[in-house]
Amino acid sequence: MWKRSNLFAIAVMALMLISAQVSSAQTAQHSSTDEAALRQIVQQVQDGWNAHDGKAFAAPFAVDADYVVVNGMKIKGREGIEKGHTQIFTTIYKDSQNVATVKSIRFLRRDVAVVHVEWNLEFRAGGEKRKAQAINTMIMTKDNGKWSIAAFHNTPIQPQGR
């Protein structure tokens, strides 16, 4: 015959298992909602670029964001990101188009995610149509229920065989 202590232990274990399954389901649901929000931020960055609008491009960035350009230059803050992109959208990237493909999203915590994005850029230089590829790492953070880009590091993808 089962002792009361054994029955109690079994009941506690069953409750813990049920609780873990509910928690796991809530985390998966939470992550899918957040993942959609992160993908929307990437879309906003792409749309800002393709509209050649420095303000729209910079809008998804945190006020104090860190931004590393493909040449290694570092820009600090949304205002600097806006200013730099407003300048390039009136010069070398005036008629450019940039297409983003989210390669991966990994949640480090509920409020911090690493997002890798591949960019395919078409622009004109010296009268010629050119193409470039880059991969960037975005660190996104969630503050007061809203996601923003806290850090952005851009790296060119070299053509194969180089």
Image (cartoon, helix red, strand yellow):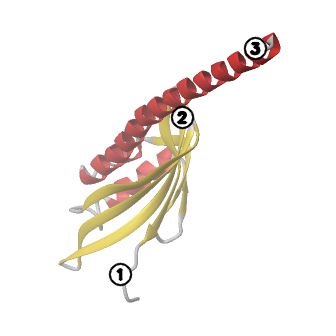
Q: Amino acid at mark 2?
A: Lys
Image point 44% across, 30% down: which residue? 29
Q: Which mark is residue 159?
A: 1
User: Residue lying furthest top in this view?
Assistant: 4
Give the residue at x 48% y 72%: 71
**Res 8 label:** 3
The disc, 3 or 2, on the residue closer to the chain's N-terminal end is 3
Q: In x, y percent, where is residue 106?
A: 51, 48
Outermost front residue: 1
Quick one: label 1, few (<14), some, or many (20+) residues within 10 Å? few
User: What's the residue type where badge 3 is placed?
Assistant: Phe
The disc at residue 142 is: 2
Q: Are marks 3 and 1 in contact (CB under 8 Å)?
A: no
Q: Quadrant of the C terminus?
A: bottom left
SS category of the residue bearing label 2: strand
The residue lying toward the viewer, choosing from 121 and 112, is 112
Residue 144 visible in the picture: no
